[in-house]
Amino acid sequence: MPGFIGILLLLSAALLPLTQTVSAQTQTNPINFSVKGMISQNSNFHGTVIWSIIHDSKGTVILQSPVGRGVAHLSLSASTACSESPTICLFSTVTDTTNIQAFQVGDTARFSIDTNTNQEKISMLSGTLAGFDVTVNLSKIWNNTQSTSPNN
């Protein structure tokens, strides 16, 4: 048995540098980003205000429309499927909702946020609204601690 423990310790010591290298290569900076704006006139659901709050792999979307306010919490991951080259491209899955009848747990969407054009495009991929795209004209952008108002 003592020989087995010695071999185990030797293998652990040999694999430790490899594990640290892999960990360093796969580590990414967390995204802390928030945007606010109104859905554009030429888009579905125009006139609705949307806040998109991104904190690493979690997100919150708050919708304010003439019929009330709703909240959806999301699980997020990076995506390469955005057609343009936005600042941020994310795939999302709804994890829970409050006061939003159209979104259900498990629904998916893609967020394409471009701070150069001050627009956010949300493409619904599954669920009741699958196939709908909305464009949001951003009026406020918070990137970590920096806040800007692109339309001022």
Image (cartoon, rainbow, N blue to C red):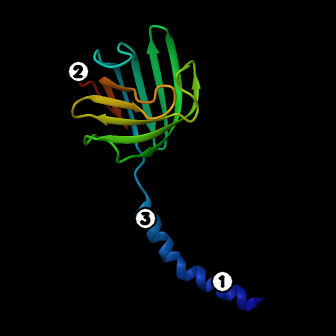
Identify the residue under disc 1: 8
From the viewer's perspective, is 95 left or right of 131?
right
Residue 66: quadrant of the picture: top left
Is 40 placed above or below 58 here? Answer: above
Q: Which mark is residue 56?
A: none
| Residue name at image x 46 percent, y 19 percent | 63
Residue type of the residue flagged with mark 3:
Ala
Q: Residues within 10 Å of mark 1 (few under 14, many from 20)?
A: few
Residue 138: quadrant of the picture: top left
How many numbered markers are drawn?
3
Q: Residues within 10 Å of mark 3 (few under 14, many from 20)?
A: few
**Disc 2 versus disc 3: distance between alpha carbons?**
39 Å
From the viewer's perspective, is 95 left or right of 55?
right
| Residue name at image x 40 percent, y 64 percent | 25
| Residue name at image x 57 percent, y 26 percent | 97
**Disc 2 versus disc 1: distance between alpha carbons?**
62 Å
Nearest to N terminus: mark 1 or mark 3: 1
Element under disc 1: helix
From the viewer's perspective, is 25 left or right of 104?
left
Q: Are marks 2 and 1 in contact (CB under 8 Å)?
A: no
From the viewer's perspective, is 123 left or right of 101?
left
Q: Which mark is residue 151?
A: 2
Looking at the rendered image, the quarter that the N terminus falls into is bottom right
Identify the residue under disc 3: 24
Residue type of the residue flagged with mark 2:
Asn
